[in-house]
Image (cartoon, rainbow, N blue to C red):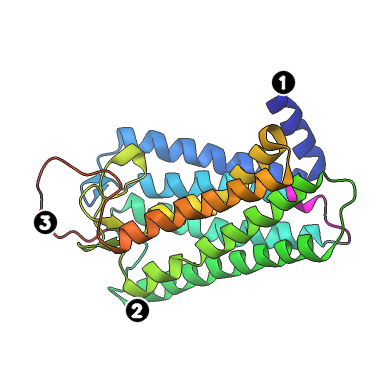
Amino acid sequence: MILISFISQLKARNEFLFYYGILCFVAALFFLIMSKVSPVQYNHVSAWYKPFKFAFSTFTFVWAMAWYCYYLPDFNVPLFNWSISLLLGFEIVYIAIMASQGKASHYNVSSSFFSIMYSMMALAATLVTLYTAYVGLLFFTNSFPELPHYYLWSIRLGILIFVVFSFEGFLMGSRMNHSVGLLNDNSTMFILGWSKKVGDLRIAHFIGMHALQVLPILSFYILKNTKLTWFFAFLYVCLALFVLIQALNGKPLMSSKSPDNKVHIDQ
């Protein structure tokens, strides 16, 4: 019942991002099916895992932002909708095209064209993060007497943590490598692809960015207290920092029992 109510309210709040989210969800399902039926691989795993992850992550992001932006007074919702959908849509389409060819989308500077496309993806991700940061700023500078104090803080902190760990992606971009100890190592860990051999900077990136959904949901339905919300946010940041430090030290989240010291080049 809660899910049905949420979907109904979300559609009423922002019909554009509601349907865009559904489109991304359907695309994610398609990419997941392709990962099971297509023989195309990259770095010993299905090349379709990457577009699946990006499409599904975009689905959760746009639905969350559609819900939160509804609370903002005098906010240009159409501009936000079109900006976010075009920027993230560009990334998903390009990643899917490259996956279909078994080629790298990220860290691919093997030609002038691929270098430009990689730079454009980085620019798109940066603009989305900055726009999200602006939304977060509006939640700090406006008053929302209709919202429970703990819920308001969960949105503020969720967006703040999202922005910080979204920019952690620049750490990977500057290294042209998401692994510490090998070159862009990959595995089949829960489709996520996190390395079982060395440190993986994508784990902190993933955990931190999904504070956008986790904190408000827990605060609204379970914690229902401002101090508890702050405390959980603190623990959440500690977790993200822990896996980041672990990755920087070259340690995997879960070790692989089979020794393999090959150097791979991943997406």
Q: Is residue 81 left or right of residue 35?
A: right
Where 201 sits versus 176, above or below? above
Front position in the image: 93 or 221: 221
Which residue is identified by label 2?
112
- Is residue 247 among what the camera can see? yes
Which callout, 3 or 1, points at the residue further toward the start of the chain?
1
Q: Main secondary structure of the magenta part?
A: loop
- Crowdedness near tag 2: few (<14), some (14–19) or many (≥20) residues, C-alpha within 10 Å: few
Which residue is identified by label 1?
1
Cα distance in 3D space between marks 3 and 1:
50 Å
- Crowdedness near tag 3: few (<14), some (14–19) or many (≥20) residues, C-alpha within 10 Å: few
Q: Is residue 149 left or right of residue 233?
A: right
* Amino acid type, callout 2: Ser
Cα distance in 3D space between marks 2 and 3:
28 Å
Which callout, 2 or 1, points at the residue further toward the start of the chain?
1
Which residue is identified by label 3?
262
Front position in the image: 149 or 211: 149
Where 257 sits versus 62, above or below? above
* Amino acid type, callout 3: Lys
Which callout, 2 or 3, points at the residue further toward the start of the chain?
2
Residue found at x 20% / y 62% = 181
- Crowdedness near tag 1: few (<14), some (14–19) or many (≥20) residues, C-alpha within 10 Å: few
User: Which quadrant of the rendered structure holds the C terminus?
Assistant: bottom left
In this view, the residue farthest toward the bottom is: 112
Where 200 sits versus 112, above or below? above
Q: Which residues are magenta?
A: 67-74
Determine which of the numbered discs, if any, sits on residue 164 in the image. Answer: none
Q: Is residue 123 left or right of residue 253?
A: right
Circles 3 and 1: CB atoms closer than 8 Å: no
- Could you say where residue 217 lies in the image, as x and y percent from the top left? 66, 39
- Could you say where residue 219 lies in the image, as x and y percent from the top left? 68, 40
User: Which quadrant of the rendered structure holds the N terminus?
Assistant: top right
